[in-house]
Image (tube, grey):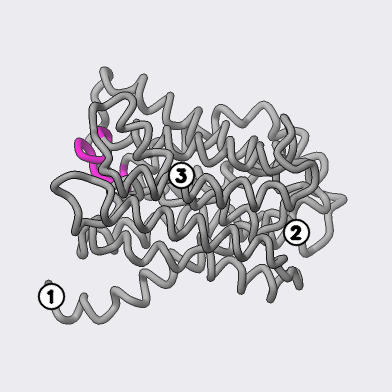
Amino acid sequence: MNPSVAKFIPLIAAVAIVSWGSAYPVVRIALHDLPPIPLAALRYMIASIMALGWLAWKRPPFPAWRDWPRFIVCGAIGISLYNIFFNTGEVTVSAGAASLLISAAPLIAALLAVAFLGERLTFWGWIGSLLSFAGVVLIAEGQMGGISFGSGATLVFGAAVCGALYTTLQKKLVHRYGALPSICYILIIGAVLLSPWLPQALSALPHASISSWAAVLELGIFPAAIGYAAWAFVIGHLGAARGAGMLYLLPPTTLILAFLLTGEVPSSRTLIGGAIVMAGVFVTNIYGHPRRATRQGDAAQTDPGKA
């Protein structure tokens, strides 16, 4: 690696982690004035404009028509449905708890690979899986509505499932077209699918507070656009296995930002449950895959627990 580039890797990785971590508390700020789904539509309209600008500037190869169904499914599940579940869930779920529930997404992706792609987990992989889901239940039971159907915690966990499905589906696209071009097309598709709620967002925005305006702009620019670009740069220079280790910093970063931005203090149940979830994800990613015991989480390659 070029030494002049290497010295900037920690800074660029920090930009990605802080950008993604900020989404959890900033969504809660924006929800004070905007409904959950229109907020998602407005956020991704901003992100899609930036993605279109990047595509017009870089002009990467246009995807083959045979790949467009996969792009559309990725946009529908990984952007539209994910954010519908996530934003609606965050109406009642704290930012810290949401980040810890979403952190189970790489583990869910690993289980999906076992179920549908023929991959295997070792004994420790299954132990890690059970450990993480125990942590998820502990966190969920401490939120309003608990783990009842349609509660905020179950909606956020539904977002984690969407994130895991998206991670699995987009791998072929990333291998074929690269991380950043693939993500740009997926962001644009997700924005188009959310566009029916855009008029409602635009009608609510004039009555919103300055903090909500700032929150919407931050969500569209940083987590949804700059965060992805920064992470693609890091992965491109470090590789997925080395870069994935940095993702364990995402939940603690979120907890700190939630305290600074909203004064949120996580409960002891949330902290204990989060520690259990992260321990399970760590065990599964490090020791859970045959012949990959020293590698770290492929499932988090390009879309790790984002919000």
57 with respect to 276 (left or right):
left
Provide residue 171's location: percent of width, then percent of height: 28, 37
158 and 29: which is toward the camera:
158
Residue 217: quadrant of the picture: bottom right
Q: Which mark is residue 65?
A: none
Provide residue 22's location: percent of width, then percent of height: 59, 64
- The residue beneath circle 2 is 29
Q: Earlier in the sequence, mark 1 or mark 3?
A: 1
Q: Which mark is residue 130?
A: 3
Q: Is residue 180 magenta?
A: yes
212 with respect to 140 (left or right):
right
Which range is magenta?
Answer: 172-181
Amino acid type, callout 3: Leu
Q: Residue at x 34, y 22 (%)?
A: 68
Provide residue 84's location: percent of width, then percent of height: 64, 35
Of badges 3 and 2, the one in the foreground is 3
- The residue beneath circle 1 is 2
Q: Residue at x 50, y 34 (%)?
A: 162
Amino acid type, callout 2: Ile
134 and 215: which is toward the camera:
134
Question: How far apart are labels 1 and 3 at the CA level?
Answer: 42 Å
Under circle 1, the secondary element is loop
* Quadrant (top left, top right, bottom left, bottom right) of the N terminus: bottom left
Circle 2 Cα neighbour tier, 10 Å, few/some/many (<14 / 14–19 / ≥20)? some
Q: Earlier in the sequence, mark 3 or mark 2?
A: 2
Q: Is residue 96 magenta?
A: no
**Up-down: is 299 above or below 221?**
above
301 with respect to 260 (left or right):
left
Total numbered badges shown on the rendered structure: 3
